[in-house]
Image: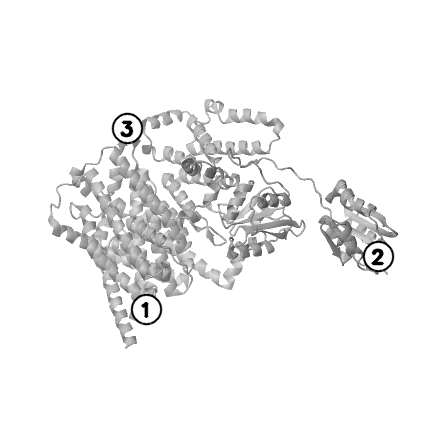
Amino acid sequence: MESKLTGLQLYAMMLVFLLGTSIIYGTPRLVPDSWLIDIAAIVPYLLLTGIYLALFWTGCDRNLYELLVAAWGKHFGKLFALGYSVYFLYIASRNLRDMVELILTALLRNTPSFVIVLAFVGIVAYAACGGIIALGRLSILIAGMVLFFFVVLTCLLYFSDSIDLERVLPFLSEGLGAVAGASLRSSIWFPYGEVLVFLAFGSSLGGAKTLRKIGLFSLLSATAILSFSNLLQTSVLGIENMKYSVFALLDAARLINIENFITRMDALVAFIIIFGVIVKSAIFLYASAKGAEFLFGSDWRGFAPSLALLIGALSIKVSRNNAEHVSEGLVYAIYWLHIPFQLAIPLATLLLLRLRLNHKEA
Amino acid sequence: MATYRFRQDRIENELRAHFGSSADLSLIPIRLADRDGLLCFLSTMTNSTFLMNNVVQPLLQASYREILFDSAEALDSLRLRLFGGLNTRLLEDPGHLPEWMTQGYAGLLLDGQDRMLLIHVQELEKRSIAEPTAQNVIRGPKEAFTESADTNMSMIRRRILNENLRFEKHVIGSKSNTSVYLAYLEGEADERLLNPIREKLRSARLTGLFDSGGLENELQSNRFYLFPTTYNSERPDSICSCLLDKRVALIVNGSPFVLIIPAQFTDFFKSPEDQYQWFVFGTFIRLLRYVAFLFSLTLPAFYVAVTCYHQELVPTLLLTSIMAQRQGIPFPAVVEMFLMEITFELLREAGTRMPRLVGQSISIAGALVLGEAAVQAGIVSNITVIIVALTAISGYVSPVYTFGANIRLFRFALIVLSSVIGLYGVILGCAYLLIHLTRIETFGVPYLSPLSRFSGKRSA
Amino acid sequence: MAAIGTLVLASLSFALLVLFDTLVYRQSFFVSVKRMFLDDAYFNRSAWTLLVSALLLSCWYDLRERPFGQRLSARLFGRRKDTRWNRN
């Protein structure tokens, strides 16, 4: 499967990947002006993705795992590759858990989570086994659908007179510093830092130049859409309600009421999140299966279904209730996983790779 | 002197032995000047008028003064003088004679010659060109393909007056030897598409081929695909516009449906009429077809999911009305839906197979089962009947019949899914379908090409 | 190899979960391990079922590579490829 993704496919994949669950949950409410957090995060995350791009460019289109081995040597490289595979599995299971929580809250209250997870995991395995190009084609369609549903939601909210921009005030009540701090504490790592996964695709990406252009474009469009989504949610719900609502877009969608006829558009939100998480999980599953293939030898297609079931098992076990899930995500996952895997190790790998290349030339 | 192989009585005996006592074997002794000869053919492959006018009369009425019957060139000169306008060949090996005769050749054997003259006398009765039965348009040509491959090829040739149009003959079917013609525009169709198709045709292991549907199964790369990977059409204008679009057509002798490879998802929603009308209207109709497809697939499942699990998604007034209707019904919504859908499938199948003369009884029976009578008997509710009827109508909107046929089964699977896990199941089923669509590839061309690859090129 | 790989990845990821448990609930490592195995009965069963089926599936994929597995899968699925469903 050595064919390349076209520019549009890569763009759609990255867009759906970034929007995925964040569009429903909204940015974590560390500050009342949550819609500014994403905008404030632009410069930091551009620096972060700059590291990834530099890594990709230095490594001449090689896989993430091959880069690790090239920089750190065979044993440490393989150890780090193992770490990354497990990391991708963990993030996938967290995303899956997010979606399962929403389904359990909004759609199917009495169904055991096992059924929901099993059905979903089968679909994700099927999507990932099609290969990266089929995933690209799928993402174009899903990106179109997610954007369409989002626009429909916005229009419906507008026409039901639920949007009141005054609810966004007071503006910057805690000051710019708090916003910047919040962006550094949470927004860079989730969702923007997860773009690291795309490095695991290696040569299918179509070159460092394409990745730079498309990556930049998709990150900026995702920021715009997410900020707009946050703004929409705040102007519909108000700052207080936003603080206490877990699924902001869902609560906003419940307020749609046009002539008492079009009401309770929960289904739209369910569509958005299910399709978004399918693509996200399929991408993580593919990256993890590629890692397993790199480490253990057999074809990644043999790993994909088993790893999908493993992601299912992990998503049930990852936390006992939603509160633990959210707090784990906000504090512990960031310090223990995201910062090392998304910042420390890639930076170190980049420096080591540069050193080795200079050594070789000299 | 005649060699032993071509002696008249020997040939006669061999033919009689080979064809058994087949009633259509005709062995007619003739006499040219002072030579004896034999004319052998299968009378069912030709008709007597043609034979009389083109073979027998010239033979009887010609003057043989210039022909030296003793020389080896006698047959050549006969061939040029008498049968110049017909397709003729010379046969060296009498063992192949039955094969040629089944393909519509008549053999002319002359005493003293060591070769035989084969004359192509095939004149079969064919259905005349009529209106299409399966794909109708209001504005557009009303010719349809017939069962004879020659007529079909001529209908394509007369529309594409291009010297690059090629027809390649393949013979498929070990016992039926059906001719299949591969049509393409040289220079437009890619070799990377043609070669795998030729390979597949050569390695097809069929004993007989009587309709292009049999060939479709051979050409399908994976038999678990839910969607058809070859497009078939009865209309010459569709086929011709596909040929101009760098695609390849397969004409099977005996089938009025011509196949187009590779097929794409959007083909099954296009009618040639869309281009012949105002573009806004054409786009609107095409959109309507997609929506109708979606409806026919998900509406029953959606209804079941909403009434069983997500009653809060329905507007309150409609909800109370639905619940009121469902009050006295003994079955759960799923069972109702299944009953009605299966009844409708029975009706549809019966309507297709039934002889035309007894057609009236079906509509009466159908109206009873699927209408007021069933509702008043308390078996189903009104809303179920409406939904089944709406689903059925939407299902017929796709211009290509076989496409709707394939996907009907998936509707039942979605109903089952929705009855187990509600709207989530419906969404997952649709996701499965979507992923399946993106994975299908025919001969290297992705199934969703124009949708997921905006190359900007609008095709017919 | 697939089975070994899945086993390694599974154990490492569950170890990660146990680690997070110790951090969030501020309890010792062994208590977390015990809770992971012995907690809420229903949730438990389903997660372990999924895990066991993941391992079994990877064993099946491994087996398919070996000659024994190929003969087995030919007996179960493969024969049908020769006898096509469009027999005339």
Compared across the picture, whether B252 is left or right of A16 comes to: right
Q: Which mark is residue A69?
A: 1
Which of marks 3 and 1 precedes in the sequence? 1
Instruction: Identify the residue at image location x=42%, y=58%.
Output: A301
Where disc 1 sits, the SS reads helix
Of tags 1 and 3, which is closer to the observer? 3
Compare residues B417 and A220 and report the one nearer the observer: A220
Q: Which mark is residue A257?
A: none
Residue B236 location, quadrant: top right
Residue farthest front in this picture: B66
Of tags 2 and 1, which is closer to the observer? 2
Residue B44 percent location from the top left of the image: 74, 43
Q: Amino acid at mark 2?
A: Leu
Give the Cα distance between marks 2 and 3. Answer: 101 Å
Compared across the picture, whether A272 is left or right of B240 comes to: left
Q: Which mark is residue B68?
A: 2
Of tags 2 and 3, which is closer to the observer? 2
Where disc 2 sits, the SS reads loop
Instruction: Identify the residue at image location x=39%, y=45%.
Output: B431
* Residue indicated by mark 3: A259
Asked whether the residues under the numbered discs 1 and 3 touch, taking CB atoms below 8 Å apart as contact, a structural biologist would say no
